[in-house]
Image (cartoon, grey):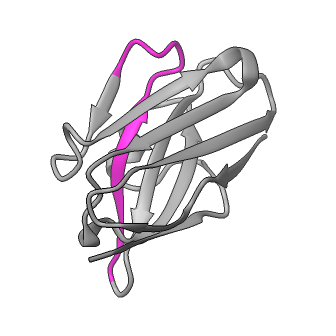
Amino acid sequence: QVQLVESGGGLVQAGGSLRLSCAASGRTFSTFFNIGWLRQAPGKEREFVATISWGGAITEYADSVKGRFFISRDNANNTVYLQMNNLKSEDTAVYYCAADRDMRPFYSVTPRYWGQGTRVTVTS
Protein backbone atom coordinates (compact mmCIF):
# COMPACT_ATOMS: atom_id res chain seq x y z
CA GLN A 1 0.00 0.00 0.00
CA VAL A 2 1.19 3.50 -0.85
CA GLN A 3 -0.27 6.69 0.60
CA LEU A 4 0.09 9.88 -1.41
CA VAL A 5 -0.53 13.46 -0.24
CA GLU A 6 -0.39 16.38 -2.64
CA SER A 7 0.33 20.00 -1.73
CA GLY A 8 1.27 23.26 -3.40
CA GLY A 9 -1.89 24.07 -5.29
CA GLY A 10 -3.44 27.52 -5.25
CA LEU A 11 -4.39 30.56 -7.24
CA VAL A 12 -1.94 31.97 -9.78
CA GLN A 13 -2.09 34.41 -12.67
CA ALA A 14 -1.57 33.26 -16.22
CA GLY A 15 2.12 33.15 -17.03
CA GLY A 16 3.04 32.38 -13.44
CA SER A 17 4.51 29.29 -11.84
CA LEU A 18 3.64 26.79 -9.14
CA ARG A 19 5.39 23.74 -7.75
CA LEU A 20 3.29 20.82 -6.62
CA SER A 21 4.62 18.25 -4.19
CA CYS A 22 3.58 14.66 -3.62
CA ALA A 23 4.65 13.10 -0.34
CA ALA A 24 4.55 9.32 -0.24
CA SER A 25 4.44 6.91 2.68
CA GLY A 26 3.74 3.25 3.18
CA ARG A 27 5.68 0.72 1.18
CA THR A 28 9.20 1.74 0.18
CA PHE A 29 8.65 4.64 -2.13
CA SER A 30 11.42 4.02 -4.57
CA THR A 31 10.89 0.29 -4.84
CA PHE A 32 9.83 0.16 -8.47
CA PHE A 33 6.97 2.63 -8.03
CA ASN A 34 6.56 4.98 -10.93
CA ILE A 35 4.84 8.23 -10.00
CA GLY A 36 2.62 10.37 -12.15
CA TRP A 37 0.53 13.51 -12.12
CA LEU A 38 -2.92 13.56 -13.61
CA ARG A 39 -5.53 16.32 -13.59
CA GLN A 40 -9.22 16.89 -13.92
CA ALA A 41 -10.51 20.19 -15.18
CA PRO A 42 -14.06 21.35 -14.37
CA GLY A 43 -16.54 19.43 -16.48
CA LYS A 44 -13.89 17.26 -18.08
CA GLU A 45 -12.48 13.79 -17.62
CA ARG A 46 -9.23 13.12 -15.84
CA GLU A 47 -6.19 13.24 -18.07
CA PHE A 48 -2.53 12.30 -17.96
CA VAL A 49 -0.06 15.11 -17.28
CA ALA A 50 3.37 13.63 -16.53
CA THR A 51 5.08 10.55 -15.15
CA ILE A 52 8.52 9.61 -13.87
CA SER A 53 10.03 6.17 -13.53
CA TRP A 54 11.00 4.76 -10.15
CA GLY A 55 14.68 5.60 -10.64
CA GLY A 56 13.98 8.95 -12.25
CA ALA A 57 15.63 8.15 -15.57
CA ILE A 58 12.45 8.21 -17.65
CA THR A 59 9.99 11.09 -17.80
CA GLU A 60 6.99 11.48 -20.06
CA TYR A 61 4.67 14.43 -20.58
CA ALA A 62 1.35 15.17 -22.19
CA ASP A 63 1.77 17.28 -25.32
CA SER A 64 -0.22 20.08 -23.71
CA VAL A 65 2.40 20.60 -20.98
CA LYS A 66 5.67 19.73 -22.72
CA GLY A 67 8.26 22.43 -22.24
CA ARG A 68 6.28 24.06 -19.44
CA PHE A 69 5.94 21.36 -16.77
CA PHE A 70 8.79 19.35 -15.28
CA ILE A 71 8.49 16.29 -13.05
CA SER A 72 11.23 15.20 -10.65
CA ARG A 73 11.59 12.95 -7.63
CA ASP A 74 13.63 12.82 -4.44
CA ASN A 75 13.57 9.22 -3.29
CA ALA A 76 15.57 10.01 -0.17
CA ASN A 77 12.70 12.20 0.99
CA ASN A 78 9.87 10.19 -0.60
CA THR A 79 8.69 13.19 -2.60
CA VAL A 80 7.82 13.88 -6.22
CA TYR A 81 7.52 17.38 -7.62
CA LEU A 82 5.74 18.95 -10.56
CA GLN A 83 7.18 22.32 -11.52
CA MET A 84 4.61 24.17 -13.59
CA ASN A 85 5.75 27.23 -15.54
CA ASN A 86 4.00 29.62 -17.92
CA LEU A 87 0.65 28.51 -16.59
CA LYS A 88 -2.42 28.97 -18.76
CA SER A 89 -6.11 29.19 -17.89
CA GLU A 90 -6.58 25.74 -19.42
CA ASP A 91 -4.26 24.33 -16.75
CA THR A 92 -6.93 25.02 -14.15
CA ALA A 93 -7.79 21.65 -12.61
CA VAL A 94 -7.48 19.40 -9.61
CA TYR A 95 -4.08 17.75 -9.83
CA TYR A 96 -3.66 14.21 -8.55
CA CYS A 97 -0.50 12.33 -7.69
CA ALA A 98 -0.61 8.62 -8.46
CA ALA A 99 1.64 5.57 -8.20
CA ASP A 100 1.92 2.29 -10.06
CA ARG A 101 4.58 -0.31 -10.71
CA ASP A 102 3.83 -0.07 -14.44
CA MET A 103 4.02 3.20 -16.38
CA ARG A 104 1.31 2.29 -18.89
CA PRO A 105 -1.67 2.83 -16.53
CA PHE A 106 -0.83 6.51 -16.27
CA TYR A 107 -1.62 7.04 -19.97
CA SER A 108 -5.01 5.36 -19.55
CA VAL A 109 -5.60 7.23 -16.28
CA THR A 110 -5.81 3.98 -14.32
CA PRO A 111 -2.85 3.90 -11.93
CA ARG A 112 -3.36 1.83 -8.80
CA TYR A 113 -2.77 4.37 -6.01
CA TRP A 114 -4.11 7.93 -5.90
CA GLY A 115 -3.81 10.96 -3.68
CA GLN A 116 -6.73 13.21 -2.81
CA GLY A 117 -5.73 15.99 -5.17
CA THR A 118 -4.75 19.64 -4.95
CA ARG A 119 -6.56 22.42 -6.79
CA VAL A 120 -4.79 24.76 -9.19
CA THR A 121 -6.62 27.81 -10.48
CA VAL A 122 -5.06 29.98 -13.17
CA THR A 123 -6.61 33.40 -13.67
CA SER A 124 -6.27 35.43 -16.84
Indicate the position of residue 54 as horizontal and vertical percent values.
53, 20
Q: Which residue is located at x 25 percent, y 71 percent?
A: 90
Q: Residue at x 60, y 54 (%)?
A: 8
Instruction: Specify the quadrant of the image occupied by residue 39.
Output: bottom left
> Can residue 103 be seen?
no
Give the total number of marks visible in the rendering: 0
The reply, left or right, for residue 13 in relation to residue 37 is left
- Residue 48, given in percent of the width and then of the height, sits at 34, 53
Q: Is residue 106 visible?
A: yes
* Left or right relative to 77: residue 44: left
Quadrant hosting residue 114: bottom right
Vertical order, 86 against 52 (above or below): below
Toward the viewer: 15 or 51?
15
Q: Nearer the viewer, residue 101 or 53?
A: 53
Residue shown at the point (55%, 24%) measured from the top left: 73
Which residue sits at x=40%, y=45%? 106
- Asked whether 95 falls inside the magenta stretch, the response is no
Magenta span has 52? yes
- Name the spot of residue 119 as percent of width and height, x first: 54, 69
Q: Which residues are magenta?
A: 44-58
| Residue 84 locus on image (x, y percent) | 38, 46
| In this rendering, position of residue 2 left or right of residue 93 | right
Viewer-nearest residue: 124 or 121: 124
The outermost residue toward the right is: 26
Look at the image and tell me in which quarter the N terminus lies.
top right
**Rendered view: 75 above or below 17:** above
Q: Is residue 58 above or below residue 4?
A: above
Q: Residue furthest bottom?
A: 43
Instruction: Quarter of the image for the C terminus: give it.
Output: bottom left
